[in-house]
Image: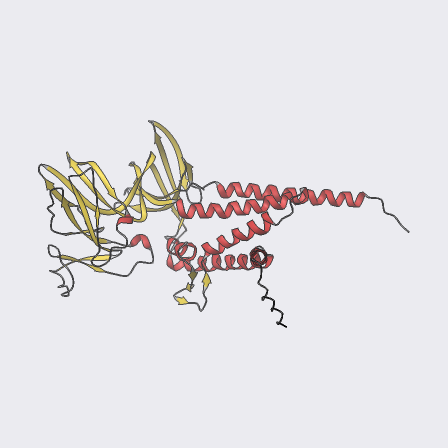
Amino acid sequence: MEPAPQPASPKKPRAAIARWLVARLSGYGLATILLVLLGLLTWLATLEQIDSGLHHTLRKYFDWRAWYVVPEIRGETLPLVLPGGYWVCALLALNLTLGGILRLRKDWRHAGVLLAHLGIIYLLVAGAVAHHFSQRGHLLIAEGATSNAAEDYFEHVVEVAEVKDAMPATIQIIGGKHLTGLEDFDTRTVRLPAMPFDLELARFFPNANLMSIADQVPSSDVRTFDGYYLVAKPLELNAEANTPGCIARILYRDGNRSEPFLLTSTAYQPFSVRFDDRIFTILLRKRLWLLPFAVRLDKFTAEFYPGTMKPSKFVSEITRLENGKPAKAVIQMNEPMRYANLTFFQASYQQLEQGPSARMASVFEVVRNPADKWPQYSLYVVSFGLLVHFLTKLVGFIKEQSRPSHHV
């Protein structure tokens, strides 16, 4: 008699594993943990911002590339490792979607709760859109002057221009993505169809000093160019203060190439090259983006707390010039100007000259954010959802109280 075959060890069905995973990801416990983490990250980021600056702190705590965060308050590193704020918000959005949308009962009694959950998810999506697609730069305008170009805070580009009548005529921009990742002996060729040559880029320094061999002789492994060389230095906490540099070479269409030369953001004059009777300039600078209108600074006023240089109020009276039509506006602290999908914040100021009659310049932070109004709309959705939920509960309570009681 043959022995009966042993039953195969039961395997957990995939459906059961999926249900278990959804239950964990949609639970109240996870939502509570994520909300506590988000509050803690916001509090620590606010403290660290005092010494490290706003943009550096935002990148450290809430950038999508920051998988974890080690807080540093007043120069002291805390023995604490926290998940990055971006991924906490992403997991919270998933938790709200699974728990508040998919698993919630779809009836009129839960309509308000459903709307409130949708509003919060909308707010989190708005933050992600702003993080990935918004642009930030600054616009410096002296009193009486007009400008229509904002300068990016962080991205550096190579600007190649043909000069005619002492003015740039044809301009071609090489974006920052072509510069990043160029290590010691890496090279990258960028085609310039509008120019009679192409450009070869090599050895990008995210932050560097331009040195002269007359001031300091470099070590034997450092390459020099016309008596100058670049020395790498640590990245600044305030990323907009970095001064990058790179090595470049002109590649002519006939196969010839120029000697390599240095490009640095600290150069006072661009590198110039003559081709036949044409003149071209090559410059490493922060990226400029044109505004759909021009801004003229009519008057700038600064007020300070008594006995200090701490500002209490900055006020810029401006004229917006669009299609030849002027429009007056006022930009001041905590009261930005929103127009054409752009937001202008009063960031700081500069004094251009000395003396009581010195001209002043206003510095605006310009933000192009496709989700600028989304947080406002999400607040409306959440508020309406909570109002519906309250009224639903109130009507249910009144109906319950109005029922006749039966005594035995």
Is residue 157 toward the left or the right of residue 92 in the image? left
Task: Compare residues 72 and 106 and report the one nearer the observer.
Answer: 106
Tell which residue pokes out farthest to the front in this image: 1
Give the x, y percent position of residue 72. 41, 64
For residue 245, say whether it is visible.
yes
Q: Nearer the viewer, residue 90 or 303?
A: 90
Q: Position of residue 279 (x, y in %)?
A: 13, 39
Please report the residue visible at 79 percent of the width from the left and 45 percent of the height from the top: 401
| Of 194 and 372, the residue lying toward us | 194
Q: Is residue 355 visible?
A: no
143 relative position to 120: left or right = left
* Residue at image location 59% in from the left, 45% down from the top: 116
How many badges with numbers are in the image? Answer: 0
**Rendered image quadrant of residue 14:** bottom right
Question: Which percent across, then down, holds residue 381?
Answer: 57, 41
Specify the color scheme: secondary structure
Residue 369 placement (x, y as % from top left)? 41, 42
Q: Residue furthest left?
A: 276
Q: Nearer the viewer, residue 89 or 310?
A: 89
Quarter holding the N terminus is: bottom right
Q: Residue at x 80, y 43 (%)?
A: 402
Above or below: residue 289 compared with residue 26: above
- The quadrant in which residue 58 appears is bottom left
Quick one: which residue is furthest to the right in this view? 408
Q: Is residue 215 above or below residue 94?
A: below
